[in-house]
C-alpha cells in the first residue's frame, strides 16, 4: 500500500479478483486493442523485412502506400489468424498473475515478482502463438510487391497467389505450404528468436512498468489519477524495452518470413545490409506501436482489475 491522502492498493493481486468477471472482460479488452492497433503491426513488420529503404522511407510513408495500394484491408492483412493471440493472452495473463501469486507467498519483492512472472508468461504465450505468428506475418507482407521496388521472393518465398485469393484462402494456402515444405516444425520457425526477443521483453516490460509506476507515484500530487499514472508507466516501460530489444525483433521477423536458416544467418544478412542502422530499423513504427499498445493494454487491464476486484477491497482502490 501507499499513501495518497489515505492508504490505497497500488497493485491489485490475483487473489483479490473475481475471475468470472476478469477473464471475459480481459479477452474483450485485448481484442479491442488489437483491432485498433493492428495496422501498426503490419507497418512495423513490412518495414523490418524490406531491404534497406527499397519500398518505404518510414512509418508514415509505409502506411500511406499500403492504404493507397490496398485500402484499409491492406492494413489488416493477417488480422484474423493473429487474433488467436487473444487465447494465448488468457494463458499469458493467467501465468503472469499465477507466478506473481506464488512468489508473493514466498516474500519476493515487487520488481522480482514482475520480472520473473513476465518472463514465464511470455514463455507460455509464445509457445502457443508462434505458429499463428508465422502464418500472420507471411500474410502481412504479401502486399509489399504492390508498392514496387521489392523482389517477390523476399516477401513471398512460399509462392502464394494472393491477388486472386480471398483472405481466408490465403491463410489456408500459407499454412498448407509451410506444412508441405517444412512439416510441423515449420510453424515454429523463429521460435528461439521469439523466445530471445519476447521473454526478456516481457520480463523487462513488467519490471519497468512497476518501477516507473513507483517513481511516478513519488513525484505526482495525490490528486493525480492512479490509473493515468499506470498508463504512463506502461508506455514508458514499452518505450524502454523496445529500444533494447529491437534488433532481436527484426531477426525474428526475418527468420519467420524470409525462411532464413538460423539466427546467425539473419544477423549476418541484417548487418551486411544495415550495419549500425540495424539497431534503428523500423524502430519508429515499433516505438509508436509499443507505446500505444502499452498504454491501451494497461488502460484495459487495470480498469478490468478494478471492475473485477472483490467487494472487501473495493474501498481501498484508487482510480
Image (cartoon, rainbow, N blue to C red):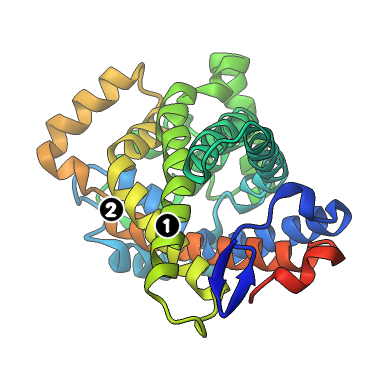
Q: Is residue 165 above or below residue 296?
A: above
Separation of residues labelled 2 and 1 (CA atoms): 10 Å
**Nearest the eye: 292 or 163:** 292
Q: Which residue is mark 1?
A: 290
Res. 296 image quadrant? bottom right
In the image, is 308 to the left or to the right of 226? right
Q: How many discs appear? A: 2
Q: Position of residue 277 (x, y in %)?
A: 14, 44
Res. 254 image quadrant? top left
In the image, is 235 to the left or to the right of 51? right
Among numbered discs 2 and 1, the one appearing first in the sequence:
2
Q: Could you classify mark 2 by the number of other residues whose Cα lies within 10 Å: few (under 14), some (14-19), or many (20 or more)?
A: many
Element under label 2? helix
**Nearest the eye: 216 or 295:** 216
Q: Is residue 158 above or below residue 296?
A: above
Q: Residue at 65%, 44% (x, y): give it.
A: 85
**Nearest the eye: 302 or 210:** 210
Q: Could you classify mark 1 by the number of other residues whose Cα lies within 10 Å: few (under 14), some (14-19), or many (20 or more)?
A: many
Instruction: State if disc 1 and disc 2 touch (CB < 8 Å).
Output: no
Element under label 1? helix
Q: Position of residue 278 (x, y in %)?
A: 19, 41
Q: Position of residue 52 (x, y in %)?
A: 19, 45
Q: Quadrant of the N terminus?
A: bottom right
Q: Residue furthest bottom?
A: 223
Q: Position of residue 155 (x, y in %)?
A: 38, 39
Q: Which residue is mark 2?
A: 283
Q: Quadrant of the C terminus?
A: bottom right
Amino acid at each position: 500500500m501507499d499513501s495518497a491522502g489515505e492508504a490505497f492498493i497500488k497493485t491489485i493481486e490475483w487473489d483479490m479478483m473475481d475471475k468470472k468477471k476478469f477473464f471475459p472482460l480481459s479477452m474483450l479488452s485485448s481484442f479491442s486493442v488489437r483491432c485498433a492497433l493492428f495496422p501498426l503491426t503490419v507497418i512495423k513488420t513490412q518495414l523490418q523485412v524490406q531491404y534497406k529503404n527499397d519500398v518505404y522511407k518510414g512509418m508514415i510513408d509505409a502506411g500511406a502506400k499500403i492504404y493507397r495500394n490496398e485500402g484499409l484491408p491492406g492494413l489488416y492483412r493477417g488480422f484474423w489468424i493473429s487474433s488467436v493471440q487473444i487465447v494465448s493472452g488468457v494463458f499469458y495473463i493467467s501465468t503472469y498473475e499465477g507466478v506473481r501469486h506464488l512468489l508473493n507467498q514466498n516474500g519476493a519483492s515487487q520488481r522480482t515478482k514482475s520480472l520473473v512472472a513476465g518472463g514465464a508468461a511470455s514463455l507460455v504465450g509464445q509457445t502457443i502463438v508462434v505458429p499463428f505468428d508465422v502464418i500472420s506475418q507471411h500474410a502481412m507482407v504479401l502486399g509489399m510487391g504492390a508498392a514496387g521496388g521489392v523482389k517477390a521472393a523476399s516477401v513471398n518465398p512460399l509462392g502464394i497467389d494472393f491477388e486472386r485469393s480471398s483472405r481466408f484462402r490465403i491463410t489456408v494456402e500459407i499454412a498448407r505450404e509451410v506444412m508441405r515444405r517444412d512439416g510441423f516444425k515449420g510453424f515454429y520457425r523463429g521460435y528461439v528468436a521469439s523466445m530471445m526477443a519476447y521473454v526478456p521483453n516481457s520480463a523487462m516490460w513488467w519490471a519497468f512498468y512497476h518501477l516507473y509506476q513507483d517513481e511516478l507515484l513519488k513525484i505526482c500530487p495525490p490528486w493525480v489519477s492512479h490509473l493515468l499514472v499506470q498508463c504512463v508507466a506502461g508506455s514508458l516501460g514499452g518505450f524502454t524495452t523496445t529500444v533494447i530489444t529491437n534488433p532481436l525483433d527484426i531477426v525474428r521477423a526475418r527468420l519467420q518470413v524470409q525462411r532464413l536458416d538460423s539466427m546467425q544467418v539473419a544477423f549476418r544478412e541484417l548487418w551486411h545490409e544495415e550495419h549500425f542502422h540495424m539497431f534503428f530499423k523500423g524502430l519508429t513504427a515499433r516505438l509508436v506501436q509499443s507505446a500505444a499498445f502499452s498504454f491501451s493494454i494497461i488502460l484495459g487491464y487495470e480498469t478490468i482489475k478494478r471492475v473485477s476486484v472483490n467487494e472487501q477491497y473495493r474501498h481501498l482502490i484508487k482510480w
